[in-house]
Amino acid sequence: MPHPEEKRFAGLLNEELHALQHTAKLRRFLAGQTIFRAGDPGDGFYLVESGRVIISAAIGSNESRPLAMVGPGEFFGEMALLDEAPRSATATAELETKTYCIGREELLALLEQRPHLALHLIREFSQRVRALNRKYIDEVLQAERLAMVGRFARTIVHDFKNPLNVIGLAAELAGMDEATPEMRSHAQTRIARQVDRMTNMLNELLDFTRNTSHKLVLANVNYAEYVSALSEELATEIKERGMRLIVEKPLPAVIVQVEPQRLSRLFYNLVNNAVEEMPPGGTVTIRARVEDGKLVNEVEDTGRGIAPEIAARLFEPFATHGKQNGTGLGLSICKKIVEDHEGNISARSEPGRGATFVFTLPLTQADS
């Protein structure tokens, strides 16, 4: 049996080990040899004399993951022995290993005679479970971090697709031999506007990932003029995707204090969200009115409506349903933009009859 002074466990098990000398079985295993497999009956409680044992569990059908490493003076195989259930994991000798195997009846008799040993084993079990919990939590957190990186990467690819298409078309137009100086100037303006849009998208996404409040850089904007200009770009963009944009006029000619770049991101997100929900030929309608000292904006589509499964989580990050290319961040970013402007956003829908997103913006005192 192991020399007491050499083993971490020996001081507590000295008498017990001597008592078990005549029943414990010395077993030798070559490096790589399986000691027992998951699903095997619990044949004994193992103490490692020398070498090292890997405890692993199956992940899927063809993959296993190490759970613990057991060295000299440590034990394994106790759970199946105590609860009389099949082995829940596989034990493999990493190195040439010697173990002592103690049968179930001998172990139970020893625990009955020496309660302090049972207490020590329970403490060891608890520490092992805690260690496994920590390992599991660390792995889950790491997996979530990797998944988050993937989601944000998909968001960037998804959001950049439309601006890059516009840039490509504008560059193609500017490069045509028959393009007039006016056409080239217009194309240059469109390219510059889309580059600014992409920069703002990245900044918005970075703010979102940091979970920090965005400090608004407000400007007094004539709402009617602003939306009319923005809608021209939006109409061109969604027309290329087989959709139509309608702006109900007259728009309220009121002054709002907003950050123009972020407000345009809000409209782009809502309109593109609508386009993704509609078959070709669909229509997006923008309308606005002044009500109770606020500017009430509506973006309505003729799509399939909001799925009941997602209605309660619509503005939560990564909430998406039935979209092949959606990232689940667009509406949560919309919510953040509106709330940063001290407004509110909501949605209403009837399945199969489209959806309407409503957001409010505060008016300046002169217009409220």
Image: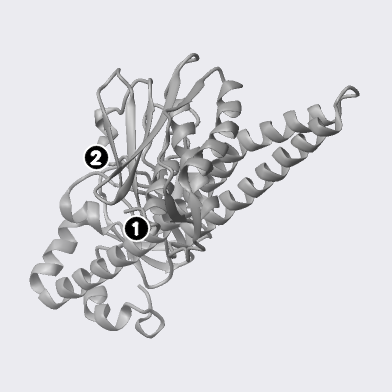
Identify the amino acid type marked 2.
Ala
Farthest residue, direction right: 177
Label 2: few (<14), some (14–19) or many (≥20) C-alpha neighbours in 10 Å: few
- Is residue 274 shown to the viewer in this render? yes
Note whether 234 is above or below 340 in the view shown: above
Task: Residue 10 in the image: state x and y as whole percent.
Answer: 32, 79
Which of these two is toward me, 219 or 22?
219
Farthest residue, direction front: 366
- Is residue 66 shown to the viewer in this render? no
Farthest residue, direction top: 281
Label 1: few (<14), some (14–19) or many (≥20) C-alpha neighbours in 10 Å: few
Q: Is residue 152 left or right of residue 120?
A: right
On the image, which quarter does residue 323 sit in? Answer: top left
Task: Residue 160 in the image: state x and y as whole percent.
Answer: 61, 40
Residue underneath mark 1 = 342
Task: Residue 48 in the image: state x and y as whole percent.
Answer: 39, 66
Q: Is residue 123 left or right of residue 273?
A: left
What residue do we see at 21% from left, 54% from top? 81
Residue underneath mark 2 = 312
Q: Is residue 13 left or right of residue 341?
A: left
- Determine whether the residue tagged by mark 1 lies in a helix, strand or loop: loop
Which of these two is toward me, 106 or 150?
150
